[in-house]
Amino acid sequence: MTEKKEDPHNEQDNANSPDIQTHLNELLSGDDGSSKTKLSGKEKKLSKMRRIKANKKKANESDKLTPLPTDQNIDNDKTKTNNSQNGRQIEWKQLLFPHEWRAFKTIVVLLIVAAGLIYLISPASQVKKYDVVGTQELSDKAILKAAGLQKGQPLLTTLYQSDYFSQEAKNKNPQIAHLKLTLKSDNTLQIKVDEILKVGYVKAGNKYYPILENGDMLNREVSEQQVGGLPLYDGFTSAKQLHKTLAEFGELSMPLRHAVSEIVWSPTKQNNQRLLIYMNDGNEVLISANELSKKMKYYPGMVAQLDQAGQADLQVGAYFKPYK
């Protein structure tokens, strides 16, 4: 038998093959065994502590970067909500074509106009009743006639033109100072009247002219005899005297005004504003014109304690002298 000889080169290649394979594996894994350095125990401990500190630092930075809820964030949320709602509206609009959307809006406007026209021509929009308040001498009919107000007039238009009707009433009736229209119920308007009252008559020739509390004389309602219930003014030589007396007389109560028969301007050296007043009960009153409203109110209580007629002097104090 021939003994097979082994090639020394083959043996060397076989011996080095595991080392080559290991080296190739290290190259493929990116780990070069020759470049590794063994760390000591102390270095490993330091490396571990650095990693822990690095992790804590990252955690703190992440906490700092976490945003807290602020007003701006809340506003942003609201903006997002509004945007979402606007988005729904846009989606709704997108359901219709542009010409369809215009037609839809036109139909809505026409329906509103039609409803308004129907209301204006219906009985629900007309005045059915006027409620007059604040008058003493003038009748409701006289107020409505002077202002030009009638049933069946448009409710809203009449209410809106309150100032116009007030001016019309003042021009046609001097006793109306002002009136105001307000809505009382569905078809009823209330007329609040500021009335200028008649406070007596002035005689000119053979006729008696009504006179108002503001001093104006009425050319209408002229009569040839004095009308009961209002006094006659006599003896006044100036408009200033008369206006002062009228203003004071207008402050008296209605029953006391109707108790006066005549007011005469009767000045003296001691009192240049003295009035001589004749009462319907037969008594006379002496009083100053500038104190007429202040002192005349005591007259009813004074005469209630007397059993005979006479003259009450209210110029200074209060004295009563019976007729002889």
Image (cartoon, rainbow, N blue to C red):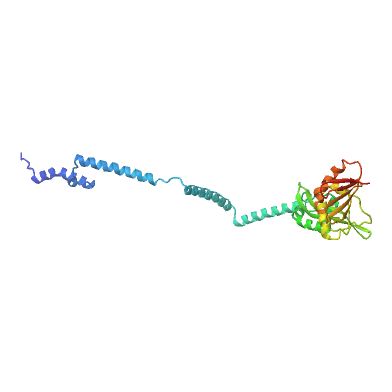
Q: How many marks?
A: 0
- Residue 170: image location, x then y, percent: 81, 57
Tell which of 236 and 54 is nearer to you. 236
Tell which of 231 and 115 is nearer to you. 231
- Residue 162: image location, x then y, percent: 76, 55
Q: Is residue 210 visible?
A: yes
- The quadrant of the picture occupied by the N terminus is top left
In this rendering, position of residue 189 left or right of residue 81: right
Which residue shows up at 89% across the image and 46% down it? 321
- Quadrant housing residue 233: bottom right
Q: Is residue 47 above or below residue 204?
A: above
Q: Is residue 149 visible?
A: no
- Residue 299: image location, x then y, percent: 85, 45
Q: Is residue 30 above or below residue 211?
A: above
- Quadrant housing residue 52: top left
Tell which of 50 and 109 is nearer to you. 50
